Image: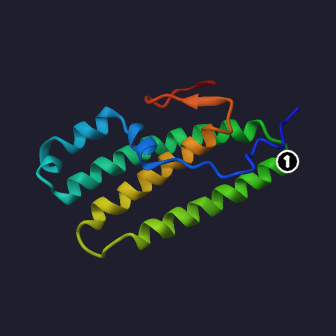
Amino acid sequence: MPVEDATPSLPLVITDAQVRAEYPQRLHECLDTGEAAKGVSVAMGGCFNAELQAQDARLNAVYRAVMAGLGDAGKARLRAEELAWIDQRDIGCREAASGGSLDRVEIPACLLTETVRRRLALEARSPVRSSARGEVSLN
C-alpha cells in the first residue's frame, strides 16, 4: 500500500556545505585541469554542465523512487511540488546572473547546487539513496 504522508511537515534545510560534499572528484578534476584551470569561463561552465547532467539523472532516479511509494494524491502533490521547484530554481539562478561572461559559470553552478540540494531533500523522503556514481540502492 502506498504511503501518502511521506512528505515531511517541515521543510528540510540542506546547507551549502552538505551540497558541496556531494560534488564528486570528477568535477574538481575538471575544474583543476586544462582551460578551466586557467579560468576560461566556457571551460568552467562545461565542467558544471557535465556534472549537472549527471546530478539531474540522479535526481530523476530518486524522484521516480519516491513517486513509486505514493498513491495518486501523493503523486499529484509531488508532481506539483517538483514543477514549482523547477520554476523557482530557474528563476533564482537567472536572477543570480550578472549579465557578463561569468554567467557561463555562475548559472550552471547555481543549477547544479540547487539540483543536488533537491536530490538530497527527496532522498530524505525516499526508501533509496543514490551513490556518488549515480547508482540507486535501498536505504
Residue at (52, 38) in percent of width and height: 58
Relative to 138, say whether 63 is above or below.
Answer: below
- Identify the coloring: rainbow
Please indicate whether residue 54 sits to the left or right of residue 48 in the image. Answer: right
**Quarter of the image with the C terminus in it:** top right
Relative to 62, say whether 118 is above or below.
Answer: below
**Quarter of the image with the N terminus in it:** top right
Q: Which residue in the protein does label 1 denote?
A: 72
Q: Badge 1: how crowded within 10 Å, few (<14), some, or many (20+)?
A: few
Residue 67 in picture, x, y percent from top left: 73, 42
Total numbered badges shown on the rendered structure: 1
Residue at (58, 30) in percent of width and height: 129
Residue at (35, 51) in percent of width and height: 49
Name of the residue lying farthest toward the top: 138
The secondary element bearing badge 1 is classed as: helix
Name of the residue lying farthest toward the right: 1
Please indicate whether residue 41 sits to the left or right of residue 72 in the image. Answer: left
Please indicate whether residue 106 sits to the left or right of residue 5 in the image. Answer: left
| In the foreground, 139 or 14 | 14
Residue 137 in picture, x, y percent from top left: 59, 24
* Amino acid carrying mark 1 in the image: Asp
Residue 8 in picture, x, y percent from top left: 73, 46
Q: Quadrant of residue 83?
A: bottom right
